[in-house]
Image: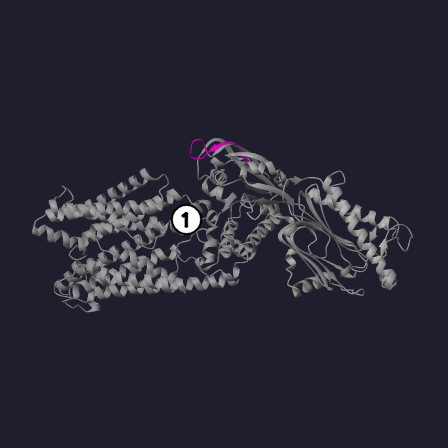
């Protein structure tokens, strides 16, 4: 009986956390829609969104330009920021759980480097694949992210028989370093225009992308999240090590493969639509774990919410802090994320000593 | 339960497991023994399916292991290894809940009421319930291992595979853990298949053992298989002497290191010091002696450096002579853990010390004698013994190397010498008026330097045996004469001693 009551308490606590993080996402979204050079009242914002999404057609009394700004510019931007942040944080928590390494994030495994290379390649050669048009860059980015994943896995398979965690991290780092060198090579070879374009893209941004990019990331995000949510128990089991997970009946190889695919889908799609945005995947899962504990059943969904909300906020800061100019969002996440992460590290060390 | 037939497997060539046949019965505690690299862990990994089977077959409850899915296998077999590293701060309860993995059903795979009940039960059993919300990483080694055991038991397995589960645990936690497992085996019929490093621990807990050597089973049987010293020596390349547990009918093994003591050999005649006062007689050796004795302290077969004989008042009637002796020895700074201790009411100045060299063997006999309660062991009905009064206390020290059997032999020889001395002096049992064979409280210690060639016999058919008899006879004879002279002159003690016996 005592157990049931503690369980209820736990459920309650988790329930509150869901509520809080949901509220965080909504309020950041509203802030993102509200704060800008052109101020639109919140009621009007809500009116536009509800009306548009339900196609009611009662917008006669609202200015066309306000409608345009909110619906075509700010809302997709906020949604994209949410999707990218959520995807990166979810992928980060999955990678950390899988690799049993709190320092792992989507960048460790080489996927985002690969996606970046694809994007830089498109920007440098100005390629447009027939039939894809503006989607050329994101599609190429996702595909090259996947190719990188395959290369990393090929390396792992060649060097160790059992998909060892340490080998995955090592192979990821090696491939990332190699790709980084190629990206630098391309940058140094390009002319001034495309150089700044490439560098700006590499810093990451969710602005001026529009609905098309939201439509692009959502299916990948849904697919990746569903795959990961279905494997939360395997992620928990892997905390004991692969042998111990095997002993309790986990099909370790299959589980690892699914988790890697899910997390790579999320990372690839996020990098494809926004460029490389660091530290979200690293810091957010840490913060969430501090509050919920390490159980992936809660860490995964909450990381998604918090990561999404955080990126909306970061985007808001990036476009308001030196308005009318915009900072790259990757700069903001790094400026906030790196010190926070350093604090977490120190705190953890002190906690362990005490 | 588990049947392994002609099993070959492991990645190396030749394969680590190379033709293993073994069968583990339902509900038994089966220990797999063997040195590092003999293939114990590989055999386990072949059973759990972490390594592929090259040849042969393994079946569990007559089902081939390859035909079982991972989940089916996890419901039948749980594994407990050495301490696992757990990343992130999972709580004890969350770790234990992982044991329910193979049993969880449904799309969401949440913990059901049954899961929670099983978790409660195993946490209660392993005594970890009170820290179930503590992070696993904060626990001590012994607690961690109990949590992992709870996790394994939460799988509700029929078979538990233990891979050196007590390797890094101290003896408290080792025995705690194994007692827990043994209890589960006895009460629930859990089959336990364990790799154990410690042969003595295996002997105490296992029902049967198997000895693995170069990927093959060398021997299978009950724990008395461990008494085959030659076999163990071949496998472990260590000098092993099988002995017995003092209170349990189980073998215990004693290992002998291969280094030699640089202080040996030493010259016997200079290796001891004697101190004698009115209160005690103390002989101290520089090197420990192998002794056999029935002293109040240091009885049985021991290694000691000190032998002493304490004078007590003739009316001494201590209920705890052992404690008294310990405290007296402490008073005179004699370490009682390295000593044989005796008591006597005889005047210690009447001690007789005889030194001899027989066929190059140095011997030393020391006797204090009193026959106030002389007894003919063949005649009198038992009236109760008094610990200290009127006894013959004999110490014999020999510069030779005896086996345990020779020690017992030598003990007999010494006794025979003593009886002969009593008879030659016509000491009588005052009750039956026949010749006495000793007193009711005689003590004897036989100490050996264990130098030189090992001697397996020390009876009357051997030079050393006769030497013991002669020495003891001579010393006892002299000591008794001194005693009788003192009785004659002072007329003391005899009556009162007899009263003491009657009482």
Query: From this viewpoint, which residue is outermost toward the right?
Result: B433
x, y percent for residue B426: 88, 51
x, y percent for residue B229: 61, 38
Residue drawn 64% across the image and 57% down it? B337
- Residue A163 drawn in magenta: no
- Kindly tell me whether residue B164 is visible in this rendering: yes
**Residue at the disc numbered 1:** A241
x, y percent for residue B40: 50, 40
Query: From this viewpoint, which residue is outermost toward the left?
Result: A192
Name the quadrant containing residue A255. top left
x, y percent for residue A172: 28, 46
State how many labels appear. Answer: 1
Q: Residues within 10 Å of mark 1 (few under 14, many from 20)?
A: some
Q: Nearer the viewer, residue B188 or B410?
A: B410
Q: Secondary structure at mark 1?
A: loop
- The stretch in magenta equals B3-15
Q: Provide the chain ID for the residue under circle 1.
A: A
Residue B423 appears left or right of B48: right
């Amino acid at each position: 009986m005592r157990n049931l009551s503690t369980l209820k308490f736990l459920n309650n606590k988790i329930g509150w956390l869901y509520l809080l993080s949901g509220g965080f996402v909504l309020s950041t979204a509203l802030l993102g829609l509200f704060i800008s050079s052109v101020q639109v009242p919140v009621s009007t914002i809500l009116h536009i969104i509800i009306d548009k999404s339900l196609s009611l057609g009662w917008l006669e009394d609202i200015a066309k330009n306000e409608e345009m700004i909110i619906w075509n510019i700010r809302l997709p931007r906020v949604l994209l920021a949410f999707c990218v942040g959520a995807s990166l944080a979810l992928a980060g928590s999955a990678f950390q759980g899988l690799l049993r390494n709190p320092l792992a994030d989507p960048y460790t495994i080489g996927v985002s480097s690969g996606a970046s290379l694809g994007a830089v390649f498109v920007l440098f050669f100005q390629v447009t694949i027939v039939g894809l048009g503006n989607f050329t860059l994101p599609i190429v980015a996702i595909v090259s992210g996947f190719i990188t994943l395959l290369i990393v896995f090929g390396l792992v398979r060649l060097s160790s028989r059992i998909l060892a965690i340490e080998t995955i991290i090592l192979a990821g780092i090696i491939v990332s370093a190699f790709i980084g060198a190629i990206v630098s090579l391309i940058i140094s070879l390009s002319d001034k225009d495309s150089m700044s374009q490439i560098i700006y893209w590499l810093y990451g941004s969710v602005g001026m992308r529009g609905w098309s990019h939201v439509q692009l990331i959502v299916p990948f995000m849904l697919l990746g999240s569903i795959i990961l949510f279905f494997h939360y128990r395997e992620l928990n089991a892997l905390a004991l090590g692969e042998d111990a997970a095997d002993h309790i009946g986990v099909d370790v190889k299959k589980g690892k493969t699914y988790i890697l695919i899910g997390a790579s889908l999320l990372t690839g799609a996020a990098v494809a639509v926004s460029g490389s945005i660091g530290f979200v995947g690293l810091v957010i899962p840490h913060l969430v774990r501090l509050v919920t504990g390490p159980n992936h059943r809660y860490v995964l969904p909450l990381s998604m919410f918090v990561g999404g909300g955080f990126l909306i906020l970061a985007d808001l800061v990036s476009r308001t802090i030196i308005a009318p100019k915009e900072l790259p969002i990757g700069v903001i996440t790094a400026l906030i994320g790196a010190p926070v992460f350093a604090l977490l590290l120190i705190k953890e060390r002190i906690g362990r000593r005490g | 339960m588990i049947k392994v037939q002609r099993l070959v497997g492991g990645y190396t060539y030749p394969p680590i497991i190379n033709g293993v046949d073994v069968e583990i019965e339902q509900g038994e505690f089966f220990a797999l023994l063997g040195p590092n690299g003999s293939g114990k862990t590989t055999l386990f990994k072949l059973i759990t399916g972490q390594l592929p089977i090259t040849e042969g077959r393994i079946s569990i409850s007559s089902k081939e292991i390859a035909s079982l899915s991972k989940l089916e296998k996890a419901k039948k077999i749980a594994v407990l290894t050495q301490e696992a590293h757990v990343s992130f701060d999972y709580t004890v309860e969350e770790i234990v809940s992982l044991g329910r993995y193979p049993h969880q059903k449904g799309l969401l795979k949440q913990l059901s009421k049954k899961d929670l009940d099983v978790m409660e039960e195993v946490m209660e059993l392993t005594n970890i319930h009170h820290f179930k919300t503590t992070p696993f990483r904060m626990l001590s080694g012994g607690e961690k291992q109990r949590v992992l055991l709870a996790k394994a038991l939460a799988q509700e397995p029929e078979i538990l595979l233990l891979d050196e589960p007590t390797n890094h645990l101290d003896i408290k936690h080792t025995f705690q853990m194994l007692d827990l497992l043994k209890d589960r085996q006895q009460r629930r019929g859990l089959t336990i298949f364990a790799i154990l490093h410690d042969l003595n621990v295996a002997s105490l807990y296992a029902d049967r053992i198997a000895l693995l050597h170069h990927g093959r089973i060398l021997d299978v049987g009950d724990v008395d298989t461990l008494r085959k010293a030659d076999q163990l020596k071949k496998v472990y390349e260590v000098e092993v002497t099988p002995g017995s547990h003092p209170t349990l009918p189980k073998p215990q093994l004693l290992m002998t290191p291969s280094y030699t003591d640089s202080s040996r050999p030493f010259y016997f005649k200079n290796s001891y010091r004697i101190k004698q006062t009115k209160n005690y007689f103390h002989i101290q050796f520089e090197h420990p002696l192998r002794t056999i004795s029935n002293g109040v302290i240091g009885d049985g077969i021991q290694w000691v450096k000190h032998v002493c004989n304490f004078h007590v008042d003739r009316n001494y009637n201590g209920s705890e002579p052992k404690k008294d002796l310990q405290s007296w020895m402490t008073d005179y700074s004699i370490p009682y853990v390295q000593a044989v201790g005796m008591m006597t009411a005889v005047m210690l100045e009447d001690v007789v010390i005889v030194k001899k060299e027989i066929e190059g063997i140095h011997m030393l006999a020391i006797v204090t004698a009193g026959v106030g309660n002389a007894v003919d062991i063949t005649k009198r009905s038992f009236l109760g013994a008094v610990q200290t009064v009127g006894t013959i206390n004999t110490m014999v020290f020999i510069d030779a190397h005896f086996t345990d059997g020779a020690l017992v032999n030598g003990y007999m020889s010494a006794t025979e010498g003593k009886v002969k001395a009593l008879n030659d002096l016509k000491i009588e049992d005052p009750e039956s008026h026949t010749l006495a064979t000793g007193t009711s409280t005689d003590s004897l210690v036989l100490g050996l330097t264990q130098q030189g060639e090992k001697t397996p016999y020390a009876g009357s058919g051997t030079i050393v045996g006769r030497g013991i008899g002669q020495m003891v006879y001579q010393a006892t004879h002299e000591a008794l004469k001194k005693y009788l002279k003192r009785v004659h002159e002072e007329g003391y003690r005899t009556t009162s001693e007899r009263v003491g016996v009657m009482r």
